[in-house]
Image (cartoon, grey):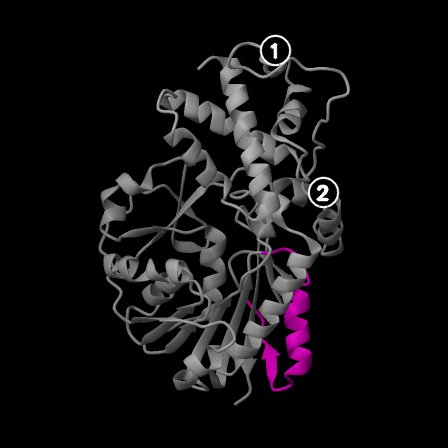
Amino acid sequence: MTPSARTQAAIELLDAIVAAARDSGAAADTLIARYFSTRRYAGSKDRRAVRELVYEAIRHAGARPESGRAAMLALANANPELAATFDGSAHGPAPIVPDEPVAAGGAAPTWLINRLKSAGINAAEQKALIGRAPLDLRINALREIDTADLGEPIPGLPHGRRLPSGTQIDTLDAYREGAIEVQDAGSQFVTMAAHAAPGQRVVDLCAGAGGKTLALAATMANKGAILASDTDRARLSRLAPRAERAGVSIVETRLLDPGHEALTLADWAGSADVVLIDAPCSGTGTWRRNPEARWRLSPARLDKLVLTQRQLLGIGAKLVKPGGVLVFIVCSLLDEEGAGQVAAFLASHLDWTADTLDLPAGRPHGPGVRLTPAHDATDGFFVARLKRAC
């Protein structure tokens, strides 16, 4: 592909990504994979170059742009070499004309910037939210493995390692043997708040594909019982093969029917030592990995997520035994999903208190701890450990 053809391909992909963000369509990675699956002529260098252009444009545009061309023009305005590829050639974009729409730069749409500021996320923190994320691993303590060649140790995480972005993990023997899992350092840190121990009864209420479930099982030395539940059948179905590969045998998966969770979980009511809720959220802490997520969020969607989180806290609280704990986690930096959400729970549940968390990362924030990319070099998280009275 010529440089002009690469620019045009990036514009076409950005058009698809903008439309998907507007209409709740597929993620950028999925759209990029589909695009190149029908364009076999594009070599690996071309694919990599186009992908880099696409993500550079996504990271630059805070609000959802008018079009893929508008997003690419924003980059071209500061890059004469890129601007030169708008040459009107057979497979390239049309020449730039005066007064064309150009995407505005920024960390996020204005309304989200205002929410972040009110939560104490300053300009430097906002900029870090759209940086590039490293590739973090969790070494599975249930497997014997030589960790010497598995990246740099992550301070505070005895089983955490950091590798260069782009490392092909699935080609490593350690991955195929279940000795390592891809898991952001922040996710590993907040899971530590559970203080899970061998022999406990633990519920991972929003388990998804089971990243935190497997981390809990390893901490428990595969002794005890973990109930991993979720409403997403496709994601939950990925947990069983992952658990088998990791040597985990204490996990039971259970599909939940939205609105009927209490009935499905009735046999665990009031009996769990730990309930972990990794709640659905805005994902403002994960923009380094999914920068187009900024274009998908709206005030109305945020309100729905806050309501869902409140409902999950109520469901999870009923599963905790007297003296047990509920660990609430969101990969969000917005207070309405984190500190504010937990404060509201405590105000309406007087027999619960917030434990002081002493994690190796993060800073105290309201009734919990917050991790941010700028301060902790992790994804952004809020976590609180809530204890039920005996």
Q: How many labels does the image show?
A: 2
- Coordinates of residue 161 in the picture (x, y in percent): 39, 47
- Residue under label 1: 84
Q: Nearer the viewer, residue 333 or 82?
A: 82
Task: Determine the residue positioned at 68% across, 40% down.
Answer: 63
- Coordinates of residue 49 in the picture (x, y in percent): 47, 23
- Is 224 left or right of 231, judged from the image as shown? left
- Is 142 left or right of 5, judged from the image as shown? left
Residue 123 badge: 2
- The answer to if 134 sits in the magenta stretch is no
**Residue 146 visible in this rendered orientation of the protein:** no
Q: In this view, does 301 lie above or below 340?
A: above
Query: What amino acid type is highlighted by mark number 2?
Result: Ala
Q: Is mark 1 on a helix, strand or loop?
A: loop
- The answer to if 343 sits in the magenta stretch is yes
Query: What amino acid type is highlighted by mark number 1?
Result: Ala
Badge 1 or badge 2: first in the primary sequence: 1
Q: Is mark 2 on a helix, strand or loop?
A: helix
- Is 171 left or right of 274, judged from the image as shown? left
Task: Determine the residue positioned at 52% across, 48% down.
Answer: 378
Pointer 2 local density, CA inside 10 Å: few below 14, some 14–19, many at least 20: few
**What segment carries the magenta color?**
332-357
Task: Determine the residue positioned at 24% across, 57% down.
Answer: 245
Task: Determine the residue positioned at 50% across, 39% down.
Answer: 28
